[in-house]
Amino acid sequence: MGILARFDGRKAFLRRGAWVSADHELEERLNLATETWSRETGGLSLSDSDPERTVADAMTARFGGRILIHQRGDPLGSPRVYFDRRQMRLYRTLLRAERLAAERLTAGSGAG
């Protein structure tokens, strides 16, 4: 269902992997920080039984916030959201590496 958290008197709601807030600056900061945290840590464990709680705990720790309400999400759908994001990030990384390798090959063959 979701998590309601408070950060310096401003509230934000986390549901299906995205933060929403009436304070657009806070919303953007939380969404960017969640993505950064995921890249830095490798993201959530595939066996995490409550991924939104894990994300909310990380963001409240990072920004000095507090979880006000925690309603567990769909045990099948919620982890899937985070898994799909992880896979898309991996796919984009592989495409970038493939493109760079092709550019190097092209540049190397033209130099000779």
Image (cartoon, grey):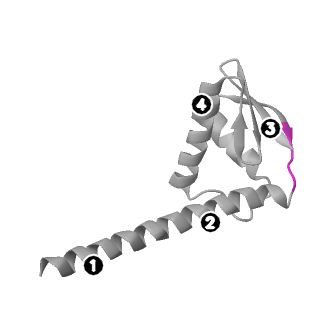
Name which of mark 1 and mark 4 comes first in the sequence.
4
Q: Is residue 107 left or right of residue 86?
A: left
Q: Is residue 106 left or right of residue 2?
A: left
Please, is residue 7 above or below residue 46 in the view?
above
> Which of the 4 quarters of the picture holds residue 12?
top right
Q: Amino acid at mark 4?
A: Phe
Q: CA distance from mark 4 to mark 3?
A: 16 Å
Q: Residues within 10 Å of mark 2 (few under 14, many from 20)?
A: few
Q: Is residue 32 magenta?
A: no
> What residue is shown with label 3?
3
**Image point 79% across, 52% down: which residue?**
50
> What residue is shown with label 1?
105
Q: Amino acid at mark 1?
A: Leu
**Image point 62% across, 40% down: which residue?**
31
Q: Secondary structure at mark 4?
A: helix
> Which of the 4 quarters of the picture holds residue 7?
top right
Query: Could you tell me residue 80's position as x and y percent?
Result: 76, 61
From the viewer's side, name the closer residue of 19 and 72: 19
Name which of mark 2 and mark 1 comes first in the sequence.
2
Q: Secondary structure at mark 2?
A: helix
> What residue is shown with label 4?
63
Please, is residue 35 above or below residue 62 in the view?
below
Name which of mark 4 and mark 3 comes first in the sequence.
3
Q: Secondary structure at mark 1?
A: helix
From the viewer's side, name the closer residue of 55 and 18: 18
Name which of mark 1 and mark 3 comes first in the sequence.
3
Name which of mark 2 and mark 4 comes first in the sequence.
4
Name the residue furthest top: 9
> Which of the 4 quarters of the picture holds residue 107?
bottom left
**Which segment is the magenta one?**
70-74
Please, is residue 33 above or below residue 49 in the view?
above
Name the residue furthest left: 112
